[in-house]
Image (cartoon, rainbow, N blue to C red):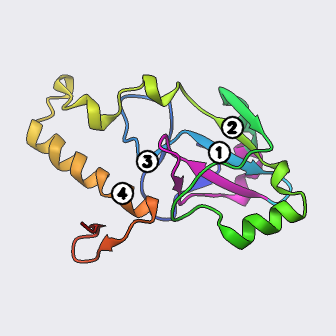
Amino acid sequence: MIGVLDPYALGCIQHGLGRPWCQHRAIRAVSWHPRLRIAQFINPEGLVLPLTVDLAKLEAFTASLVCATGQAFGELHGRGRFALHGERIEELAATGQLEEFVTYFFGPDPGTVQFMQQAGPRLDLEEKPDEWETARRRLDAIRPWLAGEPLDHQRGRAAA
């Protein structure tokens, strides 16, 4: 997506582009407040991705929202570690600014998509099952972190 910064270098991509992608890193929706320049980028599961709008490319970012396949007016979507929480949400609601969010949806309905995790190895690219499994495990480790679940700091994974 144009005009978006990925400070954690997760490799997030816009939902609906290219070959099967990781469901945890796909941008399914953006809840955007243009006046306050607050954005929440949401993956297909509803978890907020740690992305920000590059204000130097704000015009390109807003122009890319035209490609949305759907919109929800007055709605802020997303949950997890990087979502707006508590007092900030209450403050926005008290000042009537929560209603100024518009959520833009991209790509097909996630329920109709086969993500990398379900697709299995790409035989056309001669991807080996053990390499695919290693990549799947590495990518799946992102999910508990995004969700804000307790982590096993020894391994960077969700605690059992």
Q: Amino acid at mark 3?
A: Arg
Q: Amino acid at mark 2?
A: Tyr
Q: Which mark is residue 104?
A: 2
Query: Who's the residue at 22% across and 51% down the image?
Result: 137
| Place of residue 131 in the rendered image (x, y in percent of width and height, measured from the top left) | 13, 44
Q: Secondary structure at mark 1?
A: strand
- Assess whether residue 49 is covered by the magenta stretch: yes
Q: Amino acid at mark 4?
A: Ile
| Place of residue 75 in the rendered image (x, y in percent of width and height, measured from the top left) | 74, 45
Determine which quarter of the picture holds residue 37: bottom right
In this picture, residue 44 sits left or right of residue 105: left
Q: CA distance from mark 3 to mark 2?
A: 17 Å
Q: Nearer the viewer, residue 158 or 53?
A: 158
What's the magenta region? Answer: 37-61
Quadrant of image for the N terminus: top right
| Place of residue 96 in the rendered image (x, y in percent of width and height, measured from the top left) | 90, 57
Residue position marked by numbered label 1 in the rendering? 30
- Assess whether residue 21 is covered by the magenta stretch: no
In this picture, residue 35 sits left or right of residue 87: right
Asked if residue 116 is positioned above or below residue 97 in the image, the reply reads above
Q: Secondary structure at mark 2?
A: strand
Asked whether the beta carbons under mark 2 and mark 4 sit within 8 Å of each other, the answer is: no
Q: Secondary structure at mark 3?
A: loop
Residue position marked by numbered label 3 in the rendering? 25
Query: Of marks 1 and 4, which one's residue comes earlier in the chain?
Result: 1
Asked whether the beta carbons under mark 3 and mark 4 sit within 8 Å of each other, the answer is: yes
Q: Which mark is residue 142?
A: 4
Q: CA distance from mark 1 to mark 4?
A: 19 Å
